[in-house]
Amino acid sequence: MTQSFPEEVLEHVFSFLTSHTDRNAVSLVSKSWYDTERWCRDHVFIGNCYAVNPRVLTRRFKEVKAVELKGKPHFADFNLVPEGWGGCVDPWIVEMGRVYSGLEEIRLKRMEVTDEGLEMVAKGFGKLKVLVLASCDGFSTDGLAAVAANCRNLRVLDLRECEVEELSCHWLSHFPDSFTLLESLNIACLSSEVSFSALERLVSRSPNLKTLKLNRTVPLEKLSTLLQRAPQLVEFGTGAYSAEGLDAYSSLAEAFSGCKKLKSLSGFWDVIPAYLPAVYSVCSQLTSLNLSYATTQSPDLSKIISHCHNLQRLVVLDYIEDTGLETVATSCKDLKELVVFPSDPYVADANVPLTEQGLVSVSQGCTKLHSVLYFCRQMSNSALVSISKNRPNITCFRLCILEPRSPDYLTLEPLDTGFGSIVENCKQLTRLSMSGLLTDRVFEYIGKHAKKLDMLSIAFAGDTDLGLHYILSGCDSLRKLEIRDCPFGDKALLANASKLETMRSLWMSSCFVSFGACKLLGQKMPRLNVEVIDERENLNSIPENVPVEKVYIYRTVCGQRFDMPDFVRIMGKDKADVYNLS
Amino acid sequence: MPPPLLGIDGDDQGHVSLMTSASTMESIFPKNAGLTERNYLGLSDSSSVDSSAVSGISDVKRNNLNLKATELRLGLPGSQSPERDPDADLVSAESLDEKPLFPLLPSKDGICSGSQKTFVSGNKRGFSDTICSNANVNNKVSSCAQTTMIKDATSKVVSQDQTHATFGNNNKVNTSNPPAAKAQVVGWPPVRSFRKNILATNAKTNDEVDGKPGLTALFVKVSMDGAPYLRKVDLRSYTTYQQLSSALEKMFSCFTLGQCGSQGSQSLSESKLRDLLHGSEYVLTYEDKDGDWMLVSDVPWDMFIGSCKRLKIMKGSDAIGLAPRAMEKSKNRN
């Protein structure tokens, strides 16, 4: 049987497909397409490291240049996944080191990375160009030193919101003096000092450096030195943005004005407002501004933002207030993404004048707005309806009303109709996080309208299993569902068991899913791992009708995993349930 | 393809339809379940609302859960549900008065709440046990979904009282009500911990009010010699060394059990466990902001959590020489 196209032609056609979803789709067309595709895919994305295993990866794809792996479930960001749960990258590094000698890019998210693992990376992948560790932990500056010393081809070292054990400030010095290729360095997550002289020398000998994100300990007085050495920077993150007196001001302002290509600013810890105008000269160039550590008041924030006419992404604290957001609405007409974090999340009545009105203003004024993460203390159905009608192009809508189960503050009703309006009007919505008082009705709306919804986060919402049933039976595109503290139990879960195989994962914690149901689900669905995460003693003697603390359900081709701590059980499987993958 | 589960059927495109007749649907989901009219409190009949400061969270929300619709009998996790065999419980209420795993100095703070605990077996959330007895949890509907909330909410009240008791001398009685600090629900609001800690530092420098209880979470890592992985605890969810100690005890007991498992005893009786734990003489140490390792001792609790960067459970023999430094250090500072 001959192919209609020679393989080379097919491969050439495939080379235009960059998204992994497209690649996955073509590999399902026929066996020959599958085979052709697997030989030429060089960027592999694995959204759940336990859905496959390292051997499955290396058996299928032979010449991989870039790998992206994700480990812990999203709620691990909020300390809902106990330490030790898993997601260690070392076995992957061992296996990939064996097969992918040409690996150039490693991107990890929410994985546990050890110093030994980093050493293996450093010594095993001589061609490594990109190392991005996002929300990872388990390693120290020793591991970073190994990377610095050995990765001769490194361009990108990005420690995005990692937890690093900081044993020494000298790891940066391990980059050899002959190393000049650095393009991107992000150390903003480090809390201890790094050796400034090493940093300065590194910056000085890196003519291609485009991204430099410092940590808090780099003093403001040193910023102008660095900026003068790297006027070609595109993304810059300051350290602590404060100093005694104003001596450093003019050199800083001058240094900033020399950065003609600067597009993104961040950092700004401990801001002293008097120093903010030093950045005015670059404001009109900025497309991204992150002031989420700038604990300064609305007028100062508004002033700087009003200069940023080309801003596309703004991250800020609720200190910006409704008035500041009105400034955003009038000044930042290109705004695509807005993030507002709470300054004082634990105080019930913090008296910060940021309300739903701020978001409404931005939704009116910024016609390109499509992504929102907004923390506030009050919301109303009418505001949500307005927002949805103003901005039907919203694709990501995450609203967190700080007090769980807060009703519409005007009518005291649930916020069902408001969120219902969001899903009904924003037809391209792919991500939704909800809060406030919500009944089963909102889930009915979501199941009915949110056909493109890919990820849904629910907390303290709903009344009965019907709510969960609406979601699982109605949301055709749903791949990630995470639920906490909702009265959803066994019925909806079991009734929609097959749906779970079409999703990447489902997380439910502090709900009503029982041990018995988890066991049943695990028994009946061999391609799902039903992980019960429960830290109580004597799990074996807890009756089957008692709810589990947490359950994490995900599809997998690998069956059991063998690195589970004692508080994790995969339910309903015999130890022998490991697929033979020959 | 696995056999259909409870009438699920999927066609080739992976579309799932609930293959049930109308009558089966009715039996799974009774008509209009959960869609009855409710006022904003989630109650279908009028009831008075307790207007205490903390009630916004605790009291009124319990009734929001219509368990009847699910027709499942569910017990509170770790509660004495009728089916449980009490003998299977490893630790009972009497153990409270026993010497703790980590021999801290006898609590001078006098607010050891141990004696008040109605220890609910199987519950690993140490301090929340205190709350069960103190909270007015008089309705059986209280569900696991509510547990953390209620317990944390009422723990708020308890810990405030305890704080005032401890610092009775310098108790600044605020005549103007300070903004009510929220109860600490784990992982809520969904803000990353590094973001919380940074803001906490700012708040501390801005206003010097003593012990605003429950301000932010303060997660520190806890390691134990010989344990394969670390744990994390939120220091602000405890107000006494006793609470911290018993929480850690429960968290790490599995490792100690592992060590004795080789002796062939399958079911460990209470007394055996106690003997083992006390015999091993583990001590609790912490690393402070200067990087020094100290014994967790009798510096005031707030001072401790202000300087503790992480915890380590060491064998007593490894911790020789650490004891006196903590108090000396704080004296030298003052």
Image (cartoon, helix red, strand yellow):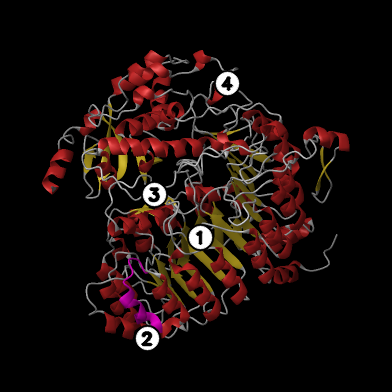
Work out how far the residue at label 1 is from the one at label 2, CA to CA, in angstroms.
Answer: 35 Å
Read off the magenta span. Answer: A268-280
Residue ID at (32%, 24%): B100
Same chain for the residues under marks 4 and 3 in the image: yes
Same chain for the residues under marks 1 and 3 in the image: no
Same chain for the residues under marks 1 and 2 in the image: yes
SS for tag 4? loop
Q: Is residue B140 left or right of residue B129?
A: right
> Amino acid type of disc 3?
Thr
Residue where numbered disc 2 is placed: A257
- Near mark 2 (Cα within 10 A), the count class, few <14, some 14-19 or many ≥20, is some
Work out how far the residue at label 4 is from the one at label 1, CA to CA, in angstroms.
Answer: 50 Å
Q: Earlier in the sequence, mark 1 or mark 2?
A: 1
Residue where numbered disc 4 is placed: B81
Q: Is residue B83 left or right of residue B215?
A: right
Parent chain of label 2? A
SS for tag 1? strand
- Near mark 3 (Cα within 10 A), the count class, few <14, some 14-19 or many ≥20, is many
Tell me, yes or no, if residue A475 can be seen here.
no
Residue where numbered disc 3 is placed: B216
**Viewer-side residue, A292 vs A123:** A292
